[in-house]
Image (tube, rainbow, N blue to C red):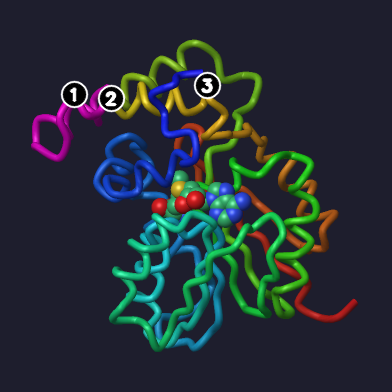
């Protein structure tokens, strides 16, 4: 274990301040993925509905949803106080429409709602915790409710070296563009990549590689009526799931 790491802090506690600037740099599909969440929400811009954002972080997805859906109200949940502090600041002008909760999504109550979404968070939940989490989400959703899950998911066995190489080329180009345009420096990108590696080695940033197929099966078992992969860019994918439209 690297003794220079602050033992009591998590990866997101220590990287929160630069998260909004560096996350879109380090993850080429991230901004597109957040735009897709808004596009895929099955409501019109003027509809009133209630939502929950699981693992909201600094509230980037929540802000997009509140901006687009002017009558939507909701709750965003995260376990990391440093991320939530930034979320609260960003959400000040929406305070009549959003509640910010500090809680662990693997065990917290999820209020009744029409829509649940989660961006880049479910890979922190161990595989054994998925059935129970999906059952709580299905149970919280009203009839015909929708769950939009955006995250990295493992890819099929036919994705070989050439596909991985193309993903790596895309990421390199994306990083070079960010450096060239002054969004980030190469030094801070290298430092962040090394920091993540060290945090992982220290067990402070635990990630799991779920497959889309396993998550779809777990969602159906949890009570969802329909689930499909509706968007994908290399490993980043969005699952769209609906609860039954009527009591069965
Ligand atoms: C990569 S960030 C994504 C944040 C945000 N959804 C976004 O798209 O920018 C992952 C977030 O999940 C949160 N998280 C991880 N495990 C969690 C858990 N068990 N309960 C609540 N939040 C969790 C972390 O604190 C972090 O803010």
Q: Which mark is residue 201?
A: 3
Q: Which residues are drawn in magenta?
A: 172-190
Task: Please identify the residue farthest to the right as the structure is shown.
Answer: 248
Specify whether residue 99 is painted magenta: no
The answer for how far apart the CA atoms under marks 1 and 3 are is 21 Å
For label 3, the crowd category at 10 Å Cα-Cα, with few meaning under 14, some 14 to 19 and many 20 or more, is few
Q: Which mark is residue 187?
A: 1
Q: Earlier in the sequence, mark 2 or mark 3?
A: 2
Location of mark 2 (residue): 191
Depicted 162 relative to depicted 79: above or below: above
- Residue toward you, 218 or 112: 112
Depicted 14 relative to depicted 53: above or below: above
The answer for how far apart the CA atoms under marks 2 and 3 are is 15 Å
Q: Main secondary structure of the magenta part?
A: helix
Relative horizontal placement of residue 96, taking residue 208 as reference (left or right): left
Residue 106: give x, y in percent of width and height. Answer: 69, 55
The answer for how far apart the CA atoms under marks 2 and 1 are is 6 Å
Residue 32: give x, y in percent of width and height. Answer: 36, 49
């Amino acid at each position: 274990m690297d003794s220079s790491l602050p033992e009591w802090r998590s990866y997101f506690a220590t990287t929160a301040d630069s998260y909004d600037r560096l996350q879109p740099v380090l993850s080429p599909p991230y901004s597109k993925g957040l735009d897709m969440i808004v596009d895929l929400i099955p409501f019109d811009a003027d509809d009133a509905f209630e939502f929950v954002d699981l693992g909201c972080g600094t509230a980037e997805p929540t802000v997009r949803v509140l901006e687009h859906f002017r009558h939507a109200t909701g709750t965003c949940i995260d376990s990391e106080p440093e991320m939530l502090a930034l979320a609260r600041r960003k959400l000040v002008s929406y305070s009549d429409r959003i509640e910010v909760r500090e809680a662990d999504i693997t065990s917290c109550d999820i209020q009744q709602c029409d829509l649940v979404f989660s961006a880049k968070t479910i890979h922190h939940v161990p595989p054994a915790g998925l059935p129970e989490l999906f059952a709580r989400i299905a149970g919280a959703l009203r009839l015909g409710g929708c769950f939009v899950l955006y995250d990295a998911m493992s890819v099929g066995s036919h994705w070989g070296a050439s596909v991985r190489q193309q993903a790596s080329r895309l990421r390199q180009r994306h990083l070079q563009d960010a450096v060239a345009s002054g969004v980030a420096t190469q030094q801070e990108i290298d430092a962040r990549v090394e920091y993540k590696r060290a945090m992982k080695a220290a067990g402070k940033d635990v990630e799991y590689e779920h497959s889309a197929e396993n998550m779809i099966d777990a969602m159906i078992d949890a009570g969802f009526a329909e689930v499909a992969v509706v968007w994908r860019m290399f490993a980043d994918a969005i699952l769209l799931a609906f609860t039954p439209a009527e009591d069965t």
